[in-house]
Image: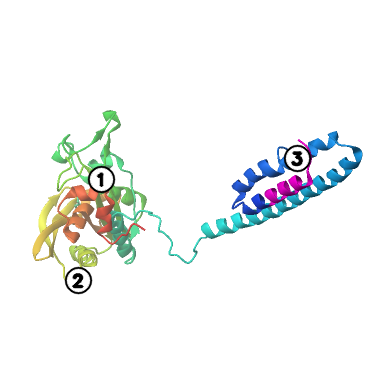
Amino acid sequence: MALDKAQIEQELQQALSQISAAVNLESLKQVKIEYVGDKSPLAKANQLLASLEPAQRAEFGKLIGGARATVNEAFEAKSNELSLQRDLIALQEEKVDVTLPARTALKGGLHPLTSLINEISDLFIGIGYNIAEGPELESEWLNFDALNIPADHPARSMQDTFFVEPLEAKLVLRTHTSPVQIRTMLNQKPPIYVICPGKTYRADELDATHTPVFHQVEGLVIDTNITMADLNGTLDYFAKSIFGDDVKTRLRPSFFPFTEPSAEVDIFFNGRWIEWGGCGMVNQKVLIACGVDIEKYSGFAFGMGLERTLMVKYGITDMHDIVEGDVRFTQRFGLGIK
Ligand code: PHE
């Protein structure tokens, strides 16, 4: 191929027009391969310089060199322009509107039982009580014997109690929160004002009204001059705080080995009497076993099921709703999943 000025000029114009026609960096890259790089017509023309006479070589060298420099400059300018354009588009497309409301992350909410325990704890702390705790895996002695529940008492039978192996260790899953009464009296001197909310276990099948793992709240007061009237007033305060001021309470004679006298506490709620829990004056046998001076002190105790309290308060008819942990149940209590 011979060198020709018009031809070189044409290649130059062609390269410039291709560069200026590139719409983005990808098409510019293609243009670079064809019109700027080592395989471009101008680069090939440059290779032919070697075969020319010195005089011609100088003339064409200048011409081709100038053309290639022009192309390179145009390419650089276009490349800068398109890079800038790409960045501007990216900025536009990836723009974040910081004024938009945030999408809330689902964090879960408190189970209504937890809220109830918090509520009960607050209202008793408000009248000077402390919260007492005890283990769920309890000694048979504290769960039964110390509470005056003898070895042949039906509550101890295999059907009701989860005994824990090895049986010689005499450990059970506590069947009520009453062993915490004993623990408290053994560890603290009167006056004692405590409540103990916690998990309890009985070998029941899960059905609409039973669950093998449930919750109780125990109350225990030991002080001078404590009478049934104090128990009555305390239960009244408790019931009104939970069920509203219109609720009425009544005590019905009953029997528990660890209280004497004993009573069932009923509440009048939504037009009917409903059994709520057990209570009574702490049996003197129990006080003596715990080293409490019965000449000086007396006390009362009460215990309620919390699932039952929740069911009565909110008209829940199926225990499954309480134990299954479906958030749609929890949400109904206004404990939004936030
Ligand atoms: N512990 C009893 C129960 O589980 C309830 C109760 C507690 C009764 C305290 C009297 C006093 O049934």
N-terminal of the two: label 2 or label 3? 3
Q: For mark 2, does the 10 Å Cα neighbourhood hold few (<14), some (14 to 19), or many (20 or more) residues?
A: few
Amino acid type shown at disc 1: Thr
Residue 228 percent location from the top left of the image: 18, 62
Point out which mark residue 226 bears: none
Which residue corresponds to mark 2?
245
| Mark 1 touches mark 2? (CB < 8 Å) | no
Q: Distance between the residues labelled 3 and 1?
A: 90 Å
Residue 186 percent location from the top left of the image: 33, 48
Which residue corresponds to mark 1?
200
N-terminal of the two: label 1 or label 2? 1
Q: How far apart are marks 2 and 3 (CA)?
A: 98 Å
Amino acid type shown at disc 2: Asp
Which of the two marks, 3 or 1, is nearer to us in this view?
Answer: 3
The residue nearer to you, when weighing 285 against 301, is 301
Point out which mark residue 43 bears: 3
Residue 216 drawn above or below residue 122: above
